[in-house]
Image (cartoon, grey):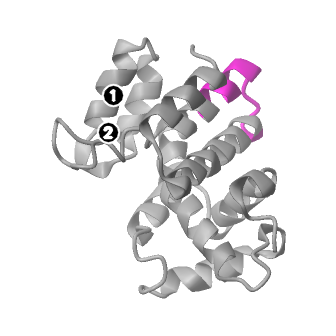
Amino acid sequence: MKTRDEAMALLAEYTQSASLLKHALAVECAMRWYAQHFQLPAEEVEKWGITGLLHDFDYEKYPEPVSPNGHPYKGNEILAELGYPEDVRRAIMGHALYTNTPRDTQMAKTLFAVDELSGLVTASVLVRPDKNIHNLEAKSVLKKMKDKAFARGCSREDIRLGAEEMGIELETQVANVIKAMQGQAAELGLAGV
């Protein structure tokens, strides 16, 4: 398995957008939190974190979805060439519904479940006057989720399906992702004004 430093270098090579970099870090936080929650060994926690970190690394350079030359197909190809394990690559492929890659591992289910949700949590924090994730409650995110105009790019269907696939109540799932992201609030730019 590659190191986090190697994964960060790859992410930085392909991604310039500050918001996309923060999204990668947010998904990494949630993946690490869940791996620890499931009491996985340290090397698995690291693998889950790296999977979250790299899930969209190719998105900016290869944004054409549903194309073998687009995200995440191109990223999968690059990760294979670099020697990333198949389970990492399959989880990343599975986070995009249009690839029809089965999410048949806990890591793949978790990546799918936290991806869109971490974006909705971030958006929910950024519209708060204090911009502080430590004051955010799951019920606030669920309320925002009902507003279709809010954070329109975050798929509510994917968020619901992700919680369902993990077998977790949606409110619990939201609370868990908030808790995960609170651990890295400053790095994510969500520690308040």
Q: What secondary structure is the stretch in magenta mostly built from?
A: helix
Q: Position of residue 66 (x, y in %)?
A: 18, 47
Looking at the image, which is closer to me, 2 or 46? 2
Q: Residue at x 65, y 65 (%)?
A: 174
Secondary structure at numbered mark 1: helix
Quadrant hosting residue 94:
top left
Residue 19: % across, % down: 54, 58
Q: Residue at x 25, y 42 (%)?
A: 100
Report the number of numbered marks. Answer: 2
From the top left corner, tell me how far across and down residue 48 is, in percent: 60, 32
Instruction: Confirm or deny contact between disc 1 and disc 2 (CB under 8 A).
Output: yes
The answer to whether 112 appears left or right of 193 in the picture is left
Judge left or right: residue 110 versus residue 100.
right
Magenta residues (range): 37-48
SS category of the residue bearing label 2 = loop
Residue where numbered disc 2 is placed = 72
* Residue 126 versus residue 86 in the image, above or below: below
- The one nearer the camera, 12 or 191, is 12
Q: Is residue 184 magenta?
A: no
Amino acid type of the residue tagged 2 in the rendering: Pro
Up/down of 41 relative to 102, above or below: above
Task: Read off the residue under disc 1.
Answer: 76
